[in-house]
């Protein structure tokens, strides 16, 4: 392609200037056009490499930015997936923690109920024991009072059997 271009560049001026004319004409459009084409040909020849390199560098920089953006996008997608997995894990942990808390509440409730029942039973037993103790104490007090009255009074002389019968009647 380059060879063809340079050959045309060399041949075109020869063909253009090879025409014979009868007299001087003031048409300088043809030489100006040829000079213009030669100028653009030389300009194209010298600027083709740097322009092509700049264009390729631009394409490469755009491709590099695209790859960088795709890498960031992939990284953010991976982070999103990881966050979703952690969220699901946190949800399952929360459900299990709630279940454990409910079981602990039920267990604590049961223990408190049992403890309360045991304490109530203990209080009832203590009440019954105190009631029995007070009853025995009152009985002893009454027996002691009766005996004191009986022994203090000289007019009443009772035998031991009669005394036991009297006590049984008073107590019973």
Image (cartoon, rainbow, N blue to C red):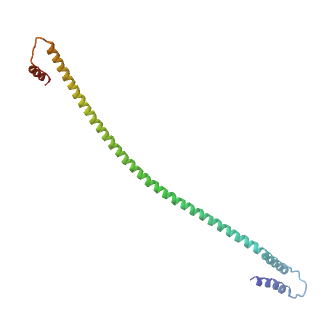
Residue 158 lies in what quarter of the image? top left
Residue 166 lies in what quarter of the image? top left
Residue drawn where x is 22% and y is 24% of the image: 137
Q: Position of residue 102 (x, y in %)?
A: 37, 48
Q: Is residue 64 above or below residue 145?
A: below
Viewer-nearest residue: 145 or 36: 145
Viewer-nearest residue: 139 or 88: 139
Residue drawn where x is 78% and y is 73% of the image: 47
Q: Is residue 37 left or right of residue 24?
A: left
Viewer-nearest residue: 97 or 28: 97
Q: Is residue 57 above or below residue 152?
A: below
Viewer-nearest residue: 86 or 162: 162
Q: Is residue 25 left or right of residue 64?
A: right
Q: Position of residue 55 (x, y in %)?
A: 71, 71
Residue 51 lies in what quarter of the image? bottom right
Q: Position of residue 75 (x, y in %)?
A: 57, 62
């Amino acid at each position: 392609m380059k060879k063809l271009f340079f050959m045309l560049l060399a041949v075109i001026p020869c063909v253009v200037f090879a025409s014979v004319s009868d007299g001087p004409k003031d048409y300088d459009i043809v030489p100006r056009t040829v000079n213009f084409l030669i100028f653009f040909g030389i300009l194209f020849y010298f600027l083709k490499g740097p322009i092509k390199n700049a264009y390729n560098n631009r394409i490469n920089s755009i491709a590099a930015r695209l790859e960088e953006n795709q890498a960031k996008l992939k990284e953010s997608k991976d982070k999103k997936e990881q966050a979703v997995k952690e969220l699901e894990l946190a949800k399952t942990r929360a459900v299990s923690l709630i279940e454990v808390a409910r079981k602990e509440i039920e267990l604590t409730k049961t223990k408190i109920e049992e403890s309360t029942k045991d304490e109530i039973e203990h209080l009832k037993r203590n009440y019954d024991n105190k009631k029995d103790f007070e009853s025995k104490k009152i009985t002893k007090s009454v027996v002691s009072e009766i005996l004191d009255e009986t022994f203090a009074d000289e007019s009443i002389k009772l035998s031991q059997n009669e005394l036991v019968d009297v006590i049984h009647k008073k107590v019973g």
